[in-house]
Image: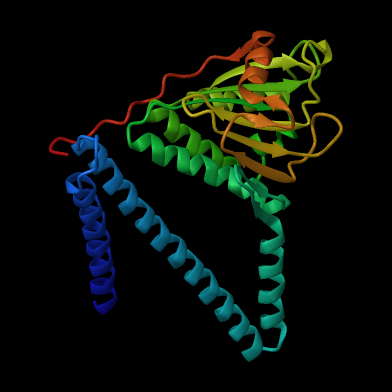
Amino acid sequence: MDRLSRETLTRIIFLLIGFVVGLLDYFVKRPGVEPDFMDSLYKALVITAILFIGELVVEIRENQLSLTASHRKFMKRNANLTGALLGAIVDELTDAVTVSEDKVVVDHKTLAILSYDTFWKLLVEKKRKGRPLTIHTIHSCAIDVWLDHPLTKSLLSRQREFCRLEGKIVRIICDRGPQAKPHVLAAAEQMASIGIEVRYYDLNSDAIDHSFAWDFAVIEETGDGAIWDSFAAAPGGVIETAVYVSGDQYKGKNLRELWARVSSMSTPLAAPAKPQKVLSMPGR
């Protein structure tokens, strides 16, 4: 309760500081300048926002230091296999996830595919808020993730929910041969049954200048991109790294343009089943 009171007081102080700055800016006379209420209000809001952001950064940093201290305390108190295991896991996670100005890289085979599941979980949550979302995606890595992978059921379940919420998914499956092979058709039929539009691109056509060594998805409404890279020299590799970018650029390629080019050279593989709409309950 005391902590909550301090946080509330801090926020009130921040709002008052912004309010006072706005008042001073509006009422202090400057030669040859007429006071502008909207300009003063904007300055007040900017000052308040900066204070709130500064508080958030400090709080995140304090939490990180507290967590690190907790890990060290545990490892010191448990100088055995359990402590060594925690140390190894912390080191592995630290090395696996890197953050730069416009992207997050998950360089770990297990975490990369797990993050793919989380990616769809977050998209479902965004769609629940009523936002229009269209996902254009290409799959050219190993197809097992859509057939018999431990996460197959979860991924399809999340994407089924996304489609039920009237989100749109168009997935292009890439493989060699003018006709899709049975395992590709099996994956496509599963996708189509939950509302996904599935198309097929023959890699042997060489119509597109691209290695097809990594999968990606683009959120059309925002341009944000998600890449699952196998770092193989050819299609069909196993996903090793996930990269999430605030934009549609990866390895010198514009993801939106690349998807559009591949789509123009692809053919329909499975028409999406009409998903059952989510109906709101009376009184809600």
- Is 119 situated above or below 273? below
Q: Answer left or right for 44 relative to 52.
A: left
Instruction: Kindly identify the residue that appears in the image at 19 percent across and 38 percent down.
Output: 37
Residue drawn at the location 64% of the way across and 35% of the way down: 146
Q: Is residue 242 visible?
A: yes
Q: Quadrant of residue 230?
A: top right
- Horizontal side of 233 relative to 159 (left or right) equals right
Specify the quadrant that holds the C terminus: top left
Visible in this render: residue 150? no
Q: Position of residue 9 (x, y in %)?
A: 23, 69
Residue 252 picture quarter: top right
Q: Residue at x 25, y 79 (%)?
A: 2
- For this orientation, the residue located farthest to the left is 283
* Foreground residue among 106 and 138: 106
Quarter location, residue 248:
top right
Residue 281 x/y as whole percent: 20, 36
Q: Give left or right: position of 122 versus 232.
A: left
Residue 262's spot in the image, x, y percent? 68, 15
